[in-house]
Amino acid sequence: MSTPRLLLLSSSAVHGHGYLEYAATDINIFLNKNRVSTVLFIPYASADYDSYLKKVEAVFSKWGYQVEGIHKHNPVEAVANAEAIFIGGGNTFLLLKTLYDKNLIKPIRQRILNDGVPYIGSSAGTNVAAPTIHNTNDMPIVYPPSFKALNLIPFNINPHYLDPDNNSTHKGETREERILQYHGLPSEYDVFNVLGLREGCTLFIDGQVGILKGINNARLFIRGKPPKEIAVGTDLSHLLTDTLRTEKKLTP
Amino acid sequence: MSTPRLLLLSSSAVHGHGYLEYAATDINIFLNKNRVSTVLFIPYASADYDSYLKKVEAVFSKWGYQVEGIHKHNPVEAVANAEAIFIGGGNTFLLLKTLYDKNLIKPIRQRILNDGVPYIGSSAGTNVAAPTIHNTNDMPIVYPPSFKALNLIPFNINPHYLDPDNNSTHKGETREERILQYHGLPSEYDVFNVLGLREGCTLFIDGQVGILKGINNARLFIRGKPPKEIAVGTDLSHLLTDTLRTEKKLTP
């Protein structure tokens, strides 16, 4: 890996805040620092690209950035020319399948890892920055050719991480139970550490430095260890040097 | 289709009831009517087959049935000799992948549809009775070779169906939003109707007759129509004659 610059949001919406509002300062600092004027927006997690683009444009233009919707261009060329990339939320399966269908996995990965193009992800867009989408909460409404994703970081993400509701009578598994189920897979399965990002969490990565930002704590699941609370401001750089998984194995 | 005999439970656990307890009468009537003495149990939705078998045996033996764990036998032979089949809950992706890995999709399908072997499913076991697992709530912890499942009925199931919580500040999609997202896929995707089974719902099918049983209402999602409440006791036979999807297309 060279010097990836990533801003990974758990979600675009947080209770009491407008679209992307809670992360406005972090997004602006991130884009300004990298001298970005135009952001390439990838709306593939949704079925309605045009409405989604309008929603994103409304917010970014207020901040002084131009937004290009990838669906208005040749997608591979748009990625090759991108100054910065933003992949928004929606359905992770639909997003990943479309990235494969349009042959964008390798080009995006190369732009981020080799050329240092800044990447912003939200929800599904944060999920696909991980090695795999094995820890998404979304409904598998379409079948992607693989669960391997962009692999920009060496651990998986569970966005919208949710604490167990002790008052609930519902018997479906809690989020923690699901992640522990993943870590409890038989040994023939290769599993990753999982960072549970509660709504309002933002993971900031600049090269070998990783910091939890935002307005809410995260929860870290290292296989074989008890889950751990991560406070806003915590240095998470050690998670980026996990060399357990090789590049070769994971590049789709 | 010949005369499938199915009892599809939303879940094994319901608030205030022991394991499978809420469905005890329905299960006993179903097995007695079909003169079953031994049930073949398939624990593949869990990683710990032996503990799961013990839990199931404890309940079925109380009711006077013998239980065989498929993992103690040659699986294909066990299916060929089964008097009745029960697939329990856990992770739907792990279950479906293991059914493919052990080459059991076609054999189970044939036993149910051609030989009239009674089938009981719970949660993940109910999900895989549908044409596809596109409407599971589970985390995709493993990658199955397809989302096509046993295809014993012509519509999909969403088990543990959950109503929106109006008091929640969480911004993840509601269950209804997820199912409508599925039905809102672009036209190149082939989608199925979805029956949302709340915990405590049981779908009873005998040949061309389908009835909602159990202790809770279901919610039916027909593409392009508003979702509809289904009361316990409702005749759902019309859903079984949906010939929109061809056998050929779906048999994995």
Image (cartoon, coloured by chain):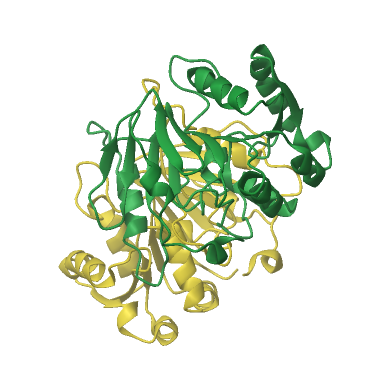
Chain colours: A green, B yellow
x, y percentage for residue A215?
38, 22
User: On the image, which quarter does residue B47 sit in?
Assistant: bottom left
Q: Is residue A74 above or below residue B27?
A: above
In this orientation, does residue A64 appear? yes
User: On the image, which quarter does residue A250 sit in?
Assistant: bottom right
Q: Residue at x 51, y 38 (%)?
A: A206
x, y percentage for residue B246?
70, 62
Depth check, front residue: B27 or A237: A237
Depth check, front residue: A66 or B222: A66
Q: Is residue A80 left or right of residue B135?
A: right
Residue lying farthest top?
A: A62
In this orientation, does residue A159 appear? no
Depth check, front residue: A25 or B33: A25
Q: Quadrant of the C terminus of chain A?
A: bottom right
Q: Residue at x 26, y 42 (%)?
A: A228
Q: Residue at x 55, y 22 (%)?
A: A29
All told, the count of numbered labels is: 0
Q: Residue at x 29, y 44 (%)?
A: A171
Q: Is residue B31 left or right of residue A95?
A: left
x, y percentage for residue B196?
47, 43
Q: Is residue B144 above or below residue A120?
A: below
Q: Is residue A56 above or below residue A163?
A: above
Q: Is residue A134 left or right of residue A62?
A: left
x, y percentage for residue B83?
37, 78
